[in-house]
Image (cartoon, rainbow, N blue to C red):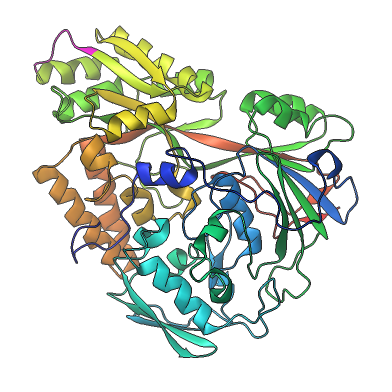
Amino acid sequence: MSRTAMGTGPSFDRRTLLRYAGLVGATAAFSSTIAACGGPASTNKTGSSTDSLTAVIGYGNNQSWDPLQTASAFSMAAILHSYESLVEGDPITRAPFPGLAKALPADVSGTSIEFELRDGAKWHDGQPVTADDVVFTYARALDPKENVLIHSFFAQWLQEVKKVDDRKVEFVLTFPFPYALQRIQICKIVPKHVFENNWPLAAGGKVVGSGPYKVTEQAPLSHTSFEKFADYNGPRPAAYQKMLWKSIVDSAPRVAAISGVKPDAQIVENIPAANADQLRKAGRTVEFADGGNNLYLMFNTAHAPFGDKRVRQALHYAIDKKKMIEIGLRGTGTPGTSFINPKLPQSQPASQSFTYDPAKAKQLLAEAGVTNLKISLSTTNTSLVLDCVKVIKEGWDAIGVQTTLDSQDTKALFSKLDNGNDFQVVSTTNNPMQFGNDPDLLIRYYYDAASLMMTKYARWNNADTQALLSLQDKAAAEQDEAKRTALNKQLLDLISEQAVIYPIVFTQLGTAWDPKAITGVHAQGYPGIYLNQAKPV
């Protein structure tokens, strides 16, 4: 699944994420009710009481709820409130703090890291959290036969997790890994006595965690209900007695839920930029956050002339990114001047900034000996993508590249890619930041020997590929921060030179809330909300 023992980070691919998010294949089995504490959706309003909260999520709640398996935006956000990792992280910076662990380890520079569990930690069913639960969870995460989604985040650097005693575990590393505390945040610990040989229960919506909120009801494609877990003794206790999270995929009713004098919800995520001003005029706070969400180009390097990096570079230089941000993103975006969002601290300027330069684009095409180029640009059909790719077509047409847009839904497009269908260029969106924000993860999500995006889709495998992968491994294993930063700079330069899969613009994700009702919340650069620091006003 990954490239031999040389690999130092995760290998994961878009198809796997789509599969576990429920976009490929059948929808996961979903239990409609966890407990008989909630009525129909119409009767489950929490109202404006400071004891309760209503939130709206712009994604479905009917996909997998298995903490080790899901990539569902709704489920992953909810899981942050109901399950815990040994190490938790700030939702924006991912700065680590103790979760189920009693304290952070003093030294993580070696190949052994020990954690002691928090005293008195309990599961939502009242049973104590033990080292056996931790070992059980990580055994599944590390087992290639289980093939869980988060396996790829740990397989290369983590050999095993061993029980020291009932309250302590030891992580045995393959080599010292500088991002260990960030990656441990991904793996939520689950109760062995509940889910051993019963993982379909987790996928179907049964939630038994140790976090501050218990899930009390699941109503597919309608809502999920929570209540405060009285026995929680961790660092971020629940501020609300009850929470109601509504699943509203359509933007108009989602915006309506946070509009008006007395809004139905106190916080709503996935707010379109076009609605920001009207909500602000109504007294709502609206924030847009930078993150990993980007519109990118992916070239089929096996389809001439896209195996020539000069052609790939030319087509990037021909795109007016500022115009795309103004027209397609309503001003809420950042030009892709580096492979990692330039607004993030992990980013560094790349050698190719791809600033709009049609003359340079024509020059590069001439140097490559390419004339009369005709391109069919395959895209997904979301409104954001459709608005943006019009600017791509305009730029390419202007330099003499006759461009046809072939837009289709996500499942259809990636089914064709999975089946090995021929294509020229793809443009769509992606966001690896819901899993983490370390540079190795953000890059290896796209570029890895086991990544379908690089290997099967882009079909990129030559000496330049191997040079990139080797440099990537070296950077991930480097312990000295300054040296690692320098290696990552080389890596970002190399990726920009090749531009096989490369961002055009980074989008921002919007969240709106009623400042008269809630405080302690922020927009984040990946889907979902984080309410473990929220408080009623």
Asked if the stretch drawn in magenta spans residue 526, the answer is no
Quadrant position of the N terminus in the picture: bottom left
Q: Residue at x 32, y 10 (%)?
A: 404
Q: Residue at x 27, y 67 (%)?
A: 478
In the visual, does 487 lie left or right of 89? left
507 shown above or below 477: above
Residue 529 in the image, given as x and y percentages of width and height: 64, 48
The rendered magenta stretch, by its main secondary structure, is classed as loop
**Residue at 56% from the left image edge and 81% from the top image edge:** 103
Q: Please give the name of the residue rendered at 89% of the width and 31% of the height, measured from the top-left corner.
A: 261
Horizontal relation, residue 381 to residue 448: left or right:
right
* Horizontal and vertical percent position of residue 440: 34, 56
* Residue 166 versus residue 499 in the image, above or below: below
Q: Which region shows up in magenta? A: 369-374
Q: Give the left or right position of residue 491, taking residue 158 as reference.
A: left
Compared with 86, 221 (above or below) is above
x, y percent for residue 13 = 34, 46
Of 128 and 333, nearer the camera is 128
